[in-house]
Image: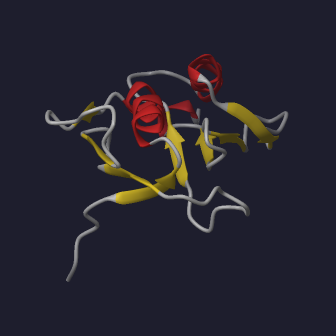
Amino acid sequence: MIVVQYVTFDCAQPYELATFWRDATGGELHPETKKEDDEILLQGGGVDLLFIKVPEGKTVKNRLHLDLTGSAGSTREEEVERLLGLGARVFEDRRNPDGTGWVTMLDPEGNEFCVCRAGYEYA
C-alpha cells in the first residue's frame, strides 16, 4: 500500500499561491519557508499541499482538482463568499434551486476547485 504524501501544484508564484491556500484551508506553511523558495509546503489543512515553481503557465483544465466543504458549521455559500474575499473567482456555478450542486472556482493562478455542501448541510 502507498500513502498520498502531498497534492502538488505547479505554479508561477509558489509563496503567493501557498498563502492563498493557507488562508483558505487553515493550514500552516512549513516553519522554514522563505518567500523566495521555489518549493513551498503547506501542512495541516486536511491534506498537505506542495507548491512548486515552474516556468510555463497553466494552459488547460486541471485533470485533478480539490473538492472542498465547510467545517465547523460553515455553509457552502459562506465558504464561496469567504474564498471570493481571499482572491478566488467563480468559474461555473452549478448550484441548483433544491440546494444540490456545487460551485467551481479558480484560485489566483487559475487552478480549478469545487466548493460543495458539507454533510451537515443535508437536512
**Image position, residue 109 (x, y; %):** 61, 42
Q: Name the image colouring.
A: secondary structure
For residue 79, above or below residue 119: above
Q: Is residue 121 above or below residue 114?
A: above
Give how far across and how far down residue 80 sits, in percent: 64, 26
The quadrant the N terminus occupies is bottom left
For residue 101, which quarter of the picture?
A: top right
- Residue at the (71%, 31%) spot, across then down: 89
Q: Which residue is nearer to you in this view: 20 or 10?
A: 10
Q: Residue at 51% of width from left, 51% of height from top?
A: 11
Q: Is residue 102 left or right of residue 39?
A: right
Q: Position of residue 56 (x, y in %)?
A: 60, 60
* Of residues 86 and 75, the one drawn nearer to the viewer in this rendering: 86
Identify the residue at image location x=72%, y=61%. Answer: 59
- Farthest-out residue, left: 31
- Residue 83 found in image quarter: top right
Q: Position of residue 49 (x, y in %)?
A: 35, 49
Where does the C terminus fall, quadrant-wise?
top right
